[in-house]
Image (cartoon, rainbow, N blue to C red):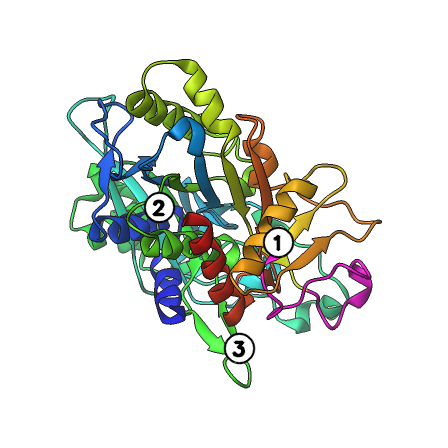
């Protein structure tokens, strides 16, 4: 299981690639794609998935029972992670033919962890389609280091280790390479270096690319670490480890169940979820309503009853106790790596967890033979929000916010626990039964 996880993390170099990796697994397991713009031909026991924007995916196994009574069992996660997005007209030409990239920070990453790493590029490009309203999408992953963000030598900033404020616009520009003046002029005629190298990788003309959504990602592979291999390290553990735990559990779920099982992987959680593919949108709610109406009949009460009988596990990684910074954590509720899945609680409702939701998840852990832990913020530290309470703005569903404890959340390379991942899959699998 962990080897598969590490391979998935390596494949999932951006939100689009993560969804593509999940789609491949779902297709291999007999799921069929349904699309919002088409009529749905679905039936009890059927396995289906819906994509939104190529960056969010929602997989369903329709229950054998009455959906209005049995409800939906939902595991939700997100496909995006902090990174650097490449701006349009990104090339900055400098002395000696050096070409740097104009980038924008996506989400709240730990900036200095991105220095001096081999970086590659992935995302999607848009080319001409059947008409102006329907451009064609091509996914791209260069799969080789093509850039780096070089640090300034300590000799020019002797106080760098005493604190170093960073400007994304000034300090975080990735360097692609250096070219002759003739090469640069050719790139400019073709639309720039970025379009040229992406087009060459795809085997198309740079002039065919209308627009792109591309990001930089660390090219190092995911790996085990620790004396006994008890940790795994990778970029994008938050939150792809949870997305793939949900996928693993759904693929292992029994063929038949009275309840309708759902894996909902949203996009744009790191920027507030306020997009058509984010948890603040009605995309999941509308899909659930559509399923209920097709299976149970066109009575709106059926959907309301189904939602009331449903439960959501909002899965987004949690902060592990750090041995160097004990003072940052709540004195009695600080989860440790290797201690099991984490129930996340916040008095100001930044998480959807309440006593009922926590009790449900705690009982699931107990029945799965898995320990669970709690995360509560230090009382003097404001916490962030996640998918659970944002989803609650779309439908009034019971649920819990949880995750696995990790170090260095939003670093270019995070660390998590092997046994925690295995235990979470066990709990999700039991939930789907």
Query: Residue 358, percent across and down?
Result: 64, 47
Residue drawn at x 70%, y 43% as measured from the top left: 355
- Is residue 150 at least partly visible in the picture? no
Is 68 displayed left or right of 203 in the figure?
Answer: right
Crowd class of label 3 (few under 14; some 14 to 19; many from 20; radius 10 Å): some
Towards the viewer: 242 or 340: 340
**Which mark, by number, is residue 362?**
1
* Image side of residue 376 versus residue 49, left or right: right
Q: Quadrant of residue 6?
A: bottom left
- Residue 330 shows up from this direction: yes
| Viewer-side label of 2, 1 | 1
Residue 347 image point, x, y percent: 77, 41
In the image, which is nearer the foreground, mark 3 or mark 2? Answer: 3
Vertical placement of 295 versus 249: above or below?
Answer: above
Residue sitting at 40 percent across and 61 percent down?
9
Residue at screen point 55% across, 40% down: 387
- Relative placement, left or right, of 28 versus 164 is left
Residue topped by disc 3 = 230
Q: Which residues are magenta?
A: 321-342
**Residue 16: which numbered mark, if any?**
2
Rate crowding at label 2 as few (under 14), some (14 to 19) or many (20 or more) other CA atoms within 10 Å.
Answer: many
Q: Depth-wise, is mark 1 or mark 3 nearer the camera? A: 1
- All told, the count of numbered labels is 3
Q: In terms of sequence position, does the residue under pointer 1 or pointer 3 come before the other?
A: 3
Q: Residue furthest top?
A: 299
Q: CA distance from mark 1 to mark 3?
A: 24 Å
């Amino acid at each position: 299981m962990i080897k598969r996880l590490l391979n998935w993390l390596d494949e999932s170099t951006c939100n689009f690639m993560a969804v593509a990796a999940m789609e491949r697994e779902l297709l291999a397991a007999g799921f069929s794609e349904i699309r919002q713009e088409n009529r749905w031909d679905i039936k009890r026991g059927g396995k289906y998935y819906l994509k939104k924007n190529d960056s969010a995916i929602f997989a369903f196994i329709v229950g054998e029972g009455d959906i209005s009574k049995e409800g939906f069992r939902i595991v939700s996660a997100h496909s995006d992670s902090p990174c650097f997005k490449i701006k349009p007209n990104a090339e900055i030409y400098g002395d000696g033919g050096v070409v740097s990239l104009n980038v924008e920070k996506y989400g709240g990453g730990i900036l200095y962890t991105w220095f001096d790493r081999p970086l590659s590029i992935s995302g999607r490009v848009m080319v001409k389609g059947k008409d102006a309203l329907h451009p064609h999408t091509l996914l791209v992953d260069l799969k080789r280091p093509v850039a780096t963000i070089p640090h300034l030598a300590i000799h020019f900033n002797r106080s760098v280790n005493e604190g170093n404020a960073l400007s994304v616009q000034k300090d975080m520009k990735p360097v692609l390479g250096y070219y002759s003046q003739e090469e640069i002029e050719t790139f400019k005629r073709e639309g720039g270096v970025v379009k040229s190298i992406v087009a060459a990788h795809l085997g198309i003309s740079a002039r065919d690319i209308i627009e792109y959504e591309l990001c930089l990602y660390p090219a190092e592979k995911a790996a085990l670490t620790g004396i006994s291999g008890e940790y795994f390290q990778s970029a994008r553990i938050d939150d792809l480890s949870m997305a793939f735990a949900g996928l693993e559990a759904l693929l292992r779920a029994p063929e038949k169940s009275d309840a309708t099982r759902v894996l909902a992987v949203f996009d744009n959680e790191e920027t507030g979820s306020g997009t058509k593919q984010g948890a603040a949108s009605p995309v999941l709610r509308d899909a659930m309503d559509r399923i209920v109406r097709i299976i149970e009949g066109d009575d709106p009460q059926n959907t309301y009853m189904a939602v009331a009988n449903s439960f959501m596990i909002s899965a987004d990684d949690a902060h592990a106790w750090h041995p160097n910074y004990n003072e940052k954590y709540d004195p009695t509720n600080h989860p440790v790596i290797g201690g099991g899945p984490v129930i996340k609680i916040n008095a100001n409702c930044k998480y959807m967890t309440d006593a009922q939701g926590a009790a449900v998840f705690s009982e699931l852990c107990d029945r799965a033979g898995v320990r669970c832990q709690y995360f509560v913020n230090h009382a003097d530290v404001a916490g962030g929000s996640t998918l659970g309470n944002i989803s609650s703005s779309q439908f009034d569903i019971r649920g819990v916010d949880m995750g696995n404890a990790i170090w260095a959340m939003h670093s270019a390379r995070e660390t998590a626990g092997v046994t925690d991942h295995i235990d979470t899959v066990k709990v999700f699998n039991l939930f789907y039964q």
